């Protein structure tokens, strides 16, 4: 299911599999779902201004690590950005405009901001979809990891493994593949799943539905189609529930919950039939 919202061209690039979308712009398009009238260009201008402050101080021919050190100084010392440890599950932590305003966020939103600044300075950082904690990766011959949630701390592979082990409570090294750079679609899906979890937990199903429509468009997991259909039913939108429930059953006809989903689909069709 593809987005049909003409105000989200960058999100649609992710859905189409573009390998290099502007993730900051995507994040702002998502934020605009909840903040109508959000000026995306103005927010991007603020990110550009942060990058320009670093550019003016950067020495000619400075190494990537030196550039990251200057980003850290501007973001975390001068501007005071921090990881939000006091209210981690505040949905505002996932909206990039709010991160810019409040100067706090969660690992993935701070990583998107940090990576966007670095990209403007010619330093490409790969997003790392590691368990429990989103990171960035600089492949400078030494595989340096960047943790924007903790002040842009630079970690070698061993330190990165220790941090993930501490956060997950699971000792032992992760396979290298789990610390490789991931696709833009994976980044966007993780950000949306964070929001979905928060809104479902709050029983704010209307907000969860807004998020789920995008998640079903970008994620490859058929469960997201099922969840979109179920949220539509929760909101008495039976007509919108049919297509995603059908898509789920077609992709997983022998799923353990197939009988339950079939019943939901039959119920949705019965309601729609009464409208005709």
Image (tube, rainbow, N blue to C red):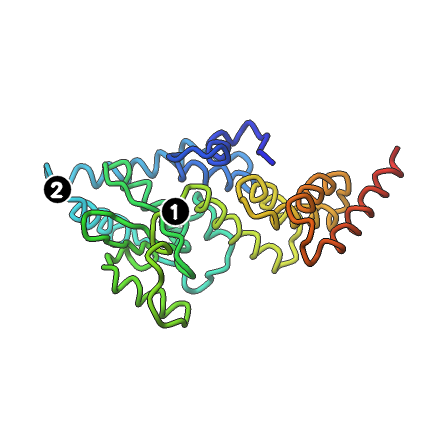
Q: Residue at x 37, y 45 (%)?
A: 112
User: What is the quadrant of the N terminus in the image?
Assistant: top right
- Could you say whether the residue bearing mark 2 is in a helix, strand or loop? loop
**Looking at the image, is 239 positioned above or below residue 82?**
above
Q: Residue at x 16, y 47 (%)?
A: 66
Q: Quadrant of residue 201?
A: bottom right
From this viewpoint, which residue is outermost toward the front?
254
Q: Position of residue 245 (x, y in %)?
A: 70, 45
Q: Earlier in the sequence, mark 2 or mark 1?
A: 2
Question: Which mark is on residue 273?
Answer: none
From this viewpoint, which residue is outermost toward the left?
60
Classify mark 2: residues with Cα within 10 Å, few (<14), some (14-19) or many (20+).
few
**Looking at the image, is 158 positioned above or below residue 269?**
below
Q: Quadrant of residue 40?
A: top left
- Could you say whether the residue bearing mark 1 is in a helix, strand or loop? loop
Instruction: Indicate left or right for 228 with 238 as reference.
Output: left
Which residue is tagged 1?
182
Q: Position of residue 82 (x, y in %)?
A: 34, 57
Please identify, in this view, whether the residue under mark 2 or under mark 1 is nearer the observer: 1
The CA distance from mark 2 to mark 1 is: 27 Å
Classify mark 1: residues with Cα within 10 Å, few (<14), some (14-19) or many (20+).
some
Q: Residue at x 42, y 60 (%)?
A: 131
Closer to the camera, 129 or 115? 129
**Looking at the image, is 56 positioned above or below residue 212?**
above
Instruction: Indicate left or right for 260 with 199 as reference.
Output: right
Closer to the camera, 259 or 98? 259
User: What is the quadrant of the C terminus in the image?
Assistant: top right
From this viewpoint, which residue is outermost toward the top?
6
Q: Position of residue 75 (x, y in %)?
A: 28, 49
Closer to the camera, 179 or 275? 179
Which residue is tagged 2?
62
């Amino acid at each position: 299911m593809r987005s049909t919202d003409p105000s989200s061209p960058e999100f649609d690039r992710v859905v189409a599999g573009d390998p290099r979308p502007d993730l900051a712009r995507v994040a702002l398009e998502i934020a605009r779902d909840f903040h109508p009238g959000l000026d995306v260009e103005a927010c991007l201008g603020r990110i550009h201004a942060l990058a320009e402050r670093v550019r003016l101080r950067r020495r000619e021919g400075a190494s990537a690590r030196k550039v990251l050190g200057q980003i850290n100084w501007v973001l975390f010392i001068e501007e005071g950005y921090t990881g939000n440890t006091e209210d981690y599950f505040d949905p505002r932590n996932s909206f990039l405009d709010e991160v810019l305003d409040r100067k706090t966020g969660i690992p993935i939103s701070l990583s998107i901001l940090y990576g966007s600044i670095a990209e403007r300075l010619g330093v490409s950082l790969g997003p790392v979809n590691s368990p429990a904690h989103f990171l960035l990766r600089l492949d400078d011959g030494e595989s340096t990891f960047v943790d924007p949630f903790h002040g842009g701390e630079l970690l070698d592979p061993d330190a990165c493994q220790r941090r993930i082990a501490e956060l997950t409570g699971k000792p032992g090294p992760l396979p290298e593949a789990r610390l490789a750079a991931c696709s833009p679609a994976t980044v966007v899906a993780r950000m949306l799943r964070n929001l979905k979890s928060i809104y479902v937990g709050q029983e704010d199903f209307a907000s969860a539905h807004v998020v789920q429509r995008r998640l079903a468009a970008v994620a490859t997991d058929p469960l997201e189609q099922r969840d979109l259909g179920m949220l539509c039913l929760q909101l008495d939108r039976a007509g919108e529930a049919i297509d995603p429930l059908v898509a789920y059953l077609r992709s997983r006809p022998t799923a353990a919950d197939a009988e339950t989903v079939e019943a939901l689909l039959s119920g949705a069709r019965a309601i729609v039939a009464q409208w005709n």
